[in-house]
């Protein structure tokens, strides 16, 4: 296994739209293992392939307290969404920034697992938030895109300041 480098906003590669996985090959399974290792090491509750500069529709998630319930989604699609809920979100690609985002309260997701077997998941709560956050990444979106222009401008100013400090 290997730790993968996580792209940071506003890296333009976070804007690429991921392509469907044609078949879960040994290479794809190796990528899934590396993504899981990278997510646990970060640590984060989820990771989309886009964040490690692989533009394929793959997500890993683990929202369990014990960090022992890995969920793998290959070619995930939201087929139903209901209600609205607000949650404080963060992102491994926007380190140190947290803000409230409104999303669907419950979603139904169709996907394949790491063995290529199809499954359906009905998610609510943090799981629903994370699945939507990760599928956004696969579509080239970052949670800060869902904030007001004023909040995005403030974040941009903060990132420029941080750049000046390191540069
Ligand atoms: O680790 C993460 N925590 C988190 C908290 C609230 C809402 C979404 C997330 S996902 C994030 C990991 C990440 O950036 N996944 O893309
Ligand atoms: Ni993220």
Image: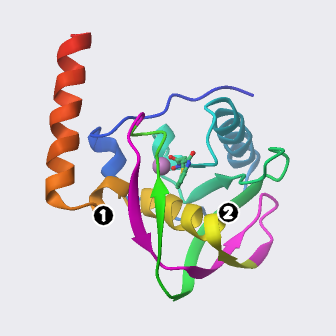
- Real-space Cα distance between discs 1 and 2? 23 Å
Choose top left, top right, bottom left or bottom right for residue 122.
Answer: bottom right
Given residues 12 and 130, the one toward you in this image is 130
User: Can residue 15 be spotted in the picture?
Assistant: yes
**The C terminus lies in quadrant:** top left
Contact between labelled residues 2 and 1, with CB atoms less than 8 Å apart: no
For the point 31% across and 54% down, the residue is: 144
Residue 132, image x and y in percent?
Answer: 51, 67
Residue 80, image x and y in percent?
Answer: 56, 89
Give left or right: position of 31 versus 163: right
Q: How crowded is mark 2: few (under 14 residues within 10 Å), some or many (20 or more)?
A: many
Residue 36, image x and y in percent?
Answer: 70, 41
Q: Does the magenta stretch include residue 116?
A: yes
> In the rendered image, which residue does mark 1 sit on?
146
User: Is ligand 1 less than 8 Å from the beta carbon at label 2?
Assistant: no
Give left or right: position of 166 versus 111: left
Image: 94 above or below 28? above
> In the image, which disc is placed on residue 73?
2
1 vs 2, front mark: 1
Residue 110, image x and y in percent?
Answer: 66, 79
Choose top left, top right, bottom left or bottom right for residue 76.
Answer: bottom right
Image: 109 above or below 60? below
Q: Residues within 10 Å of mark 1 (few under 14, many from 20)?
A: some
Point out the stretch of residues depicted in magenta.
95-119
User: Can residue 23 be spotted in the picture?
Assistant: no
For the point 64% across and 34% down, the residue is: 38
For the point 44% across and 56% down, the residue is: 137
User: Is ligand 1 less than 8 Å from the beta carbon at label 1?
Assistant: no
For the point 61% across and 41% down, the residue is: 44
Image: 75 above or below 27? below
Circle 1 sits in a helix, a strand or a loop, which is it?
A: helix
């Amino acid at each position: 296994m290997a730790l993968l480098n996580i792209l940071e906003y506003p890296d333009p590669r976070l804007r690429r739209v991921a392509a469907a996985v044609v078949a879960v090959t040994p290479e794809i399974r190796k990528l899934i293992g590396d993504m899981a290792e990278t997510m646990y090491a970060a640590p984060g509750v989820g990771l989309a392939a886009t964040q490690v500069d692989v533009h394929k529709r793959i997500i890993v998630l683990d929202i369990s307290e014990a960090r022992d319930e890995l969920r793998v989604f290959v070619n995930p699609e939201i087929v139903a969404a209901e209600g609205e809920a607000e949650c404080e979100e963060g992102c491994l690609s926007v380190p140190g920034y947290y803000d409230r985002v409104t999303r669907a309260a419950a979603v139904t997701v169709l996907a394949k697992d790491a063995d290529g077997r199809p499954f359906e998941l009905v998610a609510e709560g943090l799981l629903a938030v994370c699945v939507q956050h990760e599928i956004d990444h696969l579509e080239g979106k970052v949670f800060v895109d869902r904030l007001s222009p004023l909040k995005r401008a403030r974040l941009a100013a903060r990132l420029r300041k941080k750049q000046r400090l390191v540069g």
